[in-house]
Amino acid sequence: MFTGIVQGLATVRAIADRPGLRSFTLVFPPGFAKGLAVGASVAVEGVCLTATTLHGDTAADFDVMQQSLALTTLGTLREGSLVNVERAAKDGAEIGGHPLSGHVDFLATVAEVRRPENNHVLKVAVPAPWMRYVFPKGYIAVNGASLTVAEAQRGPDGSGSFEVWLIPETLRMTTFAEKAVGAGLNIEIERQTQVFVDTVRAAIDERLGPLLPALEALLRQQGASVDDLARPAALPRA
């Protein structure tokens, strides 16, 4: 498990392709790899990887399967690329962000970059059907960093976008400052939100059955969808 608090930037020193695998050698910031062992987990751009070879206390090798290369931004890395890294959380560690598994759900893209004073805003385009799990003020993991969604917009087809605001400290500790429009991002949704939304959707499907298409058509006329019924804010407050 990871906490979503990026601990530093590592540099890709070498890349080697083997049948079915691509191996990366990462050079870590000072002190990051102290006590790191073969078999330990490290989140790299939000992807949980296993250390296979150590190079002293400064670098390590990681093997990545072809499927992971295709489903994440790791397939686009080159020698010299910078990546967000976080060690696996130890028992009793402070959760400064929110619990992450390091299992990327989908790829998103940077749709817009704004730079108000002392802030840095990324607007992120999300493919269908993943916007059903993204809510304003909710957690989301972007390239391994736990962030709070500031704004979220959904389209009728299940796609949409959200915004995150980044302070200077976040920019200093991550790769976000270099992300331009069109850049790919690894997204891991917050698991409790996913369970909640999927449970409500399953209940709606079970209760309505044949009436569901008619409800969906009615909601579309109002610019809404069944996903909106599963939003936590849609439930009555105690």
Image (cartoon, grey):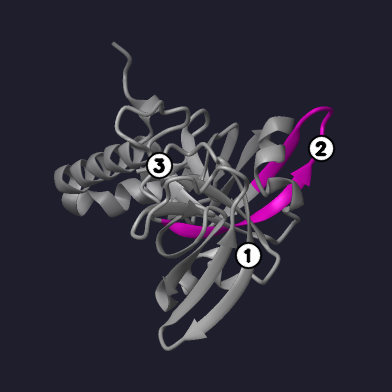
Q: CA distance from mark 2 to mark 1?
A: 28 Å
Residue 118: give x, y in percent of width and height. Answer: 80, 28
Q: What are the residue bounds of the magenta stretch?
A: 104-123
Q: Earlier in the sequence, mark 2 or mark 3?
A: 3
Q: CA distance from mark 1 to mark 3?
A: 21 Å
Does residue 152 appear to the left or right of 79 in the view shown? left
Most prominent secondary structure in the magenta stretch?
Answer: strand
Report which residue position mark 3 lands on: 2
Mark 3 crowdedness (10 Å alpha carbons): few <14, some 14-19, many ≥20? many
| Amino acid found under the numbered disc labelled 2 | Arg
Kindly identify the residue that appears in the image at 53 percent across and 53 percent down: 57
| Residue of label 1 | 12
N-terminal of the pair, mark 1 or mark 3, is: 3
Q: Depth check: give the residue in front, 8 or 217.
A: 8
- For the residues carrying marks 2 and 1, which lies nearer the camera in this image? 1
Query: Which one is in front in this view, the residue at disc 1 or the one at disc 3?
Result: 1
Q: Earlier in the sequence, mark 2 or mark 1?
A: 1
Q: Which residue is mark 2?
A: 115
From this viewpoint, which residue is outermost toward the right?
Answer: 117
Q: Secondary structure at mark 2?
A: loop
Q: Quadrant of residue 74?
A: bottom right
* Residue 110 covered by magenta stretch: yes
Does residue 134 lie above or below 109 as drawn?
above
Q: CA distance from mark 2 to mark 3?
A: 29 Å
